[in-house]
Amino acid sequence: MTNFFCRIVGVNRGQRLFFTTWTQEMSAPYRRSDKTYVVRVGFLKAIAFGRYNRVLADEDAAMLTVFRMGGVDGGA
């Protein structure tokens, strides 16, 4: 299984041309990328790419992380 990803994502109209953010999968294997690079390619579309660097234990851990309710880490 590769940890690198690249995908087309939606962005807000006023978003910068290039920025970094985090990405979290909401289905198994619940991987997280703390540094995702995003480059706009239109008004509402962008290309996001990066490398997953953590795997959370389960769906509850993923949801807690996404909603910033806790720092649960299932290990890498």
Image (cartoon, rainbow, N blue to C red):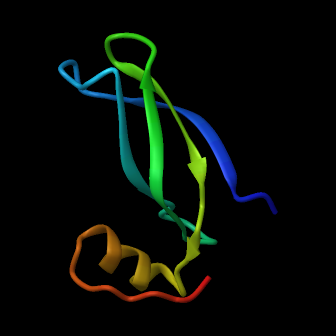
The quarter of the picture where the N terminus appears is: bottom right
Picture quarter containing residue 6? top right
Identify the residue at the far right of this view.
1
Decide if residue 22 is on the left or right side of residue 74.
Answer: left
Q: Tell me which residue sits at (58%, 35%) in the image.
A: 7
Identify the residue at the far top of this view.
42
Q: Tell me which residue sits at (47%, 40%) in the image.
A: 37
Q: Tell me which residue sits at (58%, 47%) in the image.
A: 50
How far across and down, in percent of the image, does residue 42 sit? 39, 10
What is the tally of numbered marks visible in this picture? Answer: 0
Identify the residue at the far left of this view.
14
Query: Is 8 placed above or below 55 here?
Result: above
Query: Is 76 placed above or below 44 here?
Result: below
Q: Tell me which residue sits at (34%, 75%) in the image.
A: 65
How far across and down, in percent of the image, does residue 14 sit? 18, 20
Picture quarter containing residue 55? bottom right
Query: Is 3 placed above or below 72 here?
Result: above
The quarter of the picture where the C terminus appears is: bottom right
Query: Is 6 placed above or below 45 here?
Result: below
How far across and down, in percent of the image, does residue 61 sit? 41, 84
Decide if residue 65 is on the left or right side of residue 14.
Answer: right
Decide if residue 73 is on the left or right side of residue 49.
Answer: left
Q: Nearer the viewer, residue 75 or 9?
A: 75
